[in-house]
Image: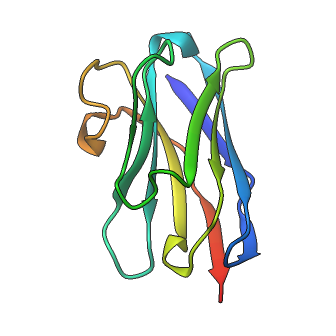
């Protein structure tokens, strides 16, 4: 089992920044690819960003590319999502997730473990 706890969400004005953190415990964190997903109000969950276990492979959704940065610190068992130039449409509950499966980092159905989510609200 891997337990994931997100933090860092909140209310921010458009154009502002937030940094989300996801702390992992349980099995060896460095064995897992990590992803961030989000669910906007009234919409389905969508992929945001993902990073391989060693950090060499990184993916972003087109909607966040150039604004968001995913990173991980395996020594701290933590993955981060730096979000800059936030837009109203970034408002969502953000979830981190862990997968042992290589090559499927964009596919939420291939993630085994999920955090409880953290709310990000961007006001105009």
Q: Is residue 86 left or right of residue 60?
A: right
Q: Quadrant of residue 106?
A: top left
* Residue 78 at x, y percent in the picture: 67, 28
Does residue 25 lie above or below 87 as drawn? above
Quarter occupied by the C terminus: bottom right
* Residue 54 at x, y percent in the picture: 50, 12
Q: Is 118 or 73 nearer to us in this picture?
A: 73
* Residue 65 at x, y percent in the picture: 44, 51
User: Does residue 79 show up?
Assistant: yes
Q: Residue pushed farthest front? A: 66
Residue shown at the point (54%, 57%) measured from the top left = 94
Residue shown at the point (64%, 76%) measured from the top left = 121
Q: Is 123 or 10 nearer to us in this picture?
A: 123
User: How many dots with numbers?
Assistant: 0
Q: Is residue 97 left or right of residue 87?
A: left
Q: Is residue 10 left or right of residue 67?
A: right
Q: Is residue 18 left or right of residue 96?
A: right
Q: Residue pushed farthest bottom? A: 124
Q: Is 56 or 21 nearer to us in this picture?
A: 56
The colour scheme used here is rainbow
User: Does residue 27 show up?
Assistant: no
Residue shown at the point (34%, 58%) measured from the top left = 46
* Residue 55 at x, y percent in the picture: 50, 18
């Amino acid at each position: 089992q891997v337990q994931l706890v997100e933090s860092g969400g909140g209310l921010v004005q458009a154009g502002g920044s937030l940094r989300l953190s996801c702390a992992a415990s349980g099995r060896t964190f460095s064995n897992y690819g990590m992803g961030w997903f989000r669910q906007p109000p009234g919409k389905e969950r969508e992929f945001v960003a993902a990073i391989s276990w060693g950090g060499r492979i990184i993916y972003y959704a087109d909607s966040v590319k150039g604004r968001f940065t995913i990173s991980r610190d395996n020594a701290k068992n933590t993955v981060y999502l730096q979000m800059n130039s936030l837009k109203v449409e970034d408002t969502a509950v953000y979830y981190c997730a862990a997968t042992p499966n290589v090559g499927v980092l964009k596919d939420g159905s291939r993630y085994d473990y999920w955090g409880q989510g953290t709310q990000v609200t961007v006001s105009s």
